[in-house]
């Protein structure tokens, strides 16, 4: 029980303070991309040319899916360097994000938000 609470606290802390590092590249689950935590990943229409346009308060609501230590992109996955220098996963050049309002694996409450955010699909 203590381990579950600690894991949750670390995940929340990482999410609130600059993104969540993935221990592996994003994966397909149920026709959408998820992090290794099972949470849905999203793309942002304003991102262009391999650059994330979601920084500051935007990244608080849409935490970037950050690379874990030693992770390298391959196949359709690439890496976007954020304004703060952190490395973020991307699919076909589109940066990948979580939505802070998704509560559990499988939630997709950010899909279509402001007509700019979309569930990432393989």
Image (tube, rainbow, N blue to C red):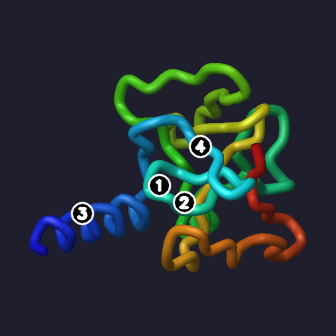
Question: Sequence order check: which comes first, mark 3 or mark 4?
Answer: 3
Measured in 3D between alpha carbons, the distance from the residue under mark 4 to the one under mark 2, in whole angstroms, is 17 Å
Percent across and percent down for residue 3 are 14, 65
Question: Sequence order check: which comes first, mark 1 or mark 4?
Answer: 1
Name the residue carrying label 1. Answer: 19
Question: Sequence order check: which comes first, mark 3 or mark 2?
Answer: 3
Frontmost of labels 4 and 2 is: 4
Question: Sequence order check: which comes first, mark 4 or mark 2?
Answer: 4
* Quarter that holds the N terminus: bottom left
Classed neighbour count for the residue bearing mark 2: other residues with Cα under 10 Å, few (<14), some (14–19), many (≥20)? many
Element carrying mark 2: loop
Frontmost of labels 3 and 1 is: 3
Measured in 3D between alpha carbons, the distance from the residue under mark 3 to the one under mark 4, in whole angstroms, is 21 Å
Measured in 3D between alpha carbons, the distance from the residue under mark 3 to the one under mark 1, in whole angstroms, is 15 Å
Residue depicted at x 59% and y 53%: 34
Closer-to-camera residue (62/35): 35
Classed neighbour count for the residue bearing mark 1: other residues with Cα under 10 Å, few (<14), some (14–19), many (≥20)? many
Residue 47 left/right relative to 39: right
Residue 77 left/right relative to 118: left
98 w.r.t. 70: above or below: below
| In contact (CB < 8 Å): disc 2 and disc 1 | yes
Residue 69 left/right relative to 89: left
Kindly identify which numbered label has been placed on residue 27.
Answer: 4
Closer-to-camera residue (65/2): 2
């Amino acid at each position: 029980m203590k381990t579950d609470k600690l894991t949750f606290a670390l995940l929340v802390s990482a999410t609130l303070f600059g993104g969540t590092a993935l221990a592996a590249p994003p994966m397909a689950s149920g026709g959408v991309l998820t992090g290794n935590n099972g949470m849905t990943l999203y793309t942002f229409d304003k991102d262009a040319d391999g650059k994330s346009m979601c920084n500051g308060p935007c990244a608080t609501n849409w935490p970037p899916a950050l690379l874990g230590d030693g992770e390298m992109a391959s196949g359709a996955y690439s890496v976007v360097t954020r304004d703060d220098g952190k490395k973020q996963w991307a699919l076909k050049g589109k940066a990948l994000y979580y939505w802070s309002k998704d509560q559990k694996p499988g939630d997709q409450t950010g899909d279509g938000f402001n007509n700019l955010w979309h569930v990432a699909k393989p």
